[in-house]
Image: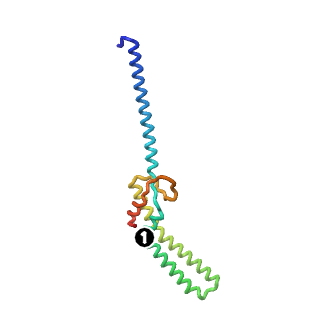
Amino acid sequence: MFKNKKVARIVAVSIVAVFLLGVFGVAITQSTVGHAANAGTASNVGKVDYQRLVNSTPEFAKFRETMQNEVAQAQKDFDEKSKTMNEKEKQDYNNQLRERLALKEQELRTPVLNQIDAAVKAVADSKGLAVVLDMSNIVYGGQDITDDVVKKLGGK
């Protein structure tokens, strides 16, 4: 086919060179894709100012108002009923009122926090975020979704 051995060698070396360049190009492309995937993973982290979410939720304002009323009522109950009690009875009754208030607080707070968590999850899902952390736990990076969650909650 080739009349000259020298031309045959040049063609063979050229084919090998093109093949190696192709393999090298594929290797470079794959390593770049790997880094892009890692960068994409890093951007799948969201962050929220959870305290701001809590404070801006209309239901949390209702929770605070209800708890203030509960505390006022407990104080009124204590003042009325403790007039005839000795110190030990007053202490026991005070402890009962504190336990009642703690249970009421948990009962009222849990649905509000569940609503916030559901809104965070909905926004995170819509933005393709795999993880959302509170800002107090993040030193650098993460996509801030606080404003989007506040809007979803109907807050200010």
Q: Position of residue 13 (x, y in %)?
A: 42, 20
Q: Nearer the viewer, residue 92 or 9?
A: 9
Residue extending farthest front: 140
SS of the residue at dot 1? helix
User: The residue under label 1 is which amino acid type?
Assistant: Glu
User: Which of the 4 image quadrants contains residue 79?
Assistant: bottom right
**Placement of 35 over or under 100, stated as above or below:** above
Q: Nearer the viewer, residue 65 or 56?
A: 56
Residue extending farthest left: 1
Which residue occupies 38% across, 15% down?
Answer: 7
Category of crowding for the residue at label 1, using alpha-carbon neighbours closer than 10 angstroms: few (below 14), some (14–19), many (at least 20): many
Residue extending farthest bottom: 84
Residue extending farthest top: 3
**Placement of 125 over or under 94, stated as above or below:** above
Q: Position of residue 94 (x, y in %)?
A: 59, 79
**Placement of 36 over or under 139, stated as above or below:** above
* 68 left or right of 147 in image: right
Which residue occupies 44% across, 44% down?
Answer: 37
Q: Position of residue 41 (x, y in %)?
A: 45, 48
User: Which of the 4 image quadrants contains residue 57?
Assistant: bottom left
Which residue occupies 54% across, 81% down?
Answer: 75
Q: Quadrant of the C terminus?
A: bottom left
Q: Position of residue 14 (x, y in %)?
A: 40, 21
Instruction: Name the residue that disc number 1 marks.
Output: 59
**Colouring of the image:** rainbow
Which residue occupies 42% across, 70% down?
Answer: 59
Number of on-image labels: 1
Q: Quadrant of the N terminus?
A: top left
Q: Nearer the viewer, residue 41 or 121?
A: 41
Q: Nearer the viewer, residue 101 or 17?
A: 17
